[in-house]
């Protein structure tokens, strides 16, 4: 039986038993369907473990969608963050 035929409600249970972000990422990469289901788990895990550092990385690389997703999954901007724009 292929993993994509699993009932969707089992995927978070399986993902919850994986020990590391690397394992979770490997699981997500097994199929496009699993990626869509597991990617939110990856973001939540990343925010818990490296939230502020990931925000800085995404901002420094111009990764706006990643930055917005991190914020949507609970990453917090430090109170002393200065936001600047390049707009004239």
Image (spheres, grey):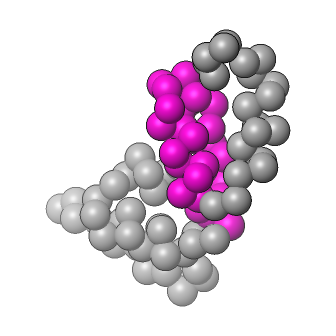
- Image spot of residue 42 (x, y percent): 60, 50
Query: For residue 85: magenta?
Result: no
Residue at 18% across, 62% down: 88
- Image spot of residue 80 (x, y percent): 54, 86
> Relative to 11, is 50 above or below?
below
Image position of 62 (left or right of 41) = left
**Viewer-nearest residue: 67 or 25:** 25
> Relative to 72, is 49 above or below?
below
**Viewer-nearest residue: 72 or 57:** 57
What type of secondary structure mainly makes up the magenta span?
Answer: helix
Image position of 83 (left or right of 78) = left
Q: Residue furthest front?
A: 1
Image position of 25 (left or right of 7) = left
Residue 76 seen in this snapshot: no
> Relative to 26, is 52 above or below?
below
Q: Quadrant of residue 4?
A: top right
- Image spot of residue 7 (x, y percent): 77, 17
Query: For residue 24: magenta?
Result: yes
Residue at 47% across, 68% down: 55
For the record, the magenta segment spans: 21-48
> Relative to 66, is 27 above or below?
above
Image position of 68 (left or right of 73) = left
Residue at 61% across, 17% down: 2
Residue 25 seen in this snapshot: yes
In which quadrant of the rendered image does the N terminus lie? top right
Residue at 55% across, 22% down: 33
């Amino acid at each position: 039986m292929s993993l994509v035929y699993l009932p969707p409600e089992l995927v978070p249970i399986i993902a919850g038993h994986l020990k590391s972000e690397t394992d979770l990422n490997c699981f997500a990469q097994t199929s496009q369907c699993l990626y869509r289901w597991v990617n939110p788990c990856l973001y939540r895990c990343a925010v818990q473990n490296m939230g502020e550092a990931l925000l800085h990385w995404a901002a420094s690389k111009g990764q706006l969608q990643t930055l917005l997703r991190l914020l949507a999954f609970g990453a917090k901007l430090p109170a002393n963050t200065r936001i600047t724009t390049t707009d004239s």
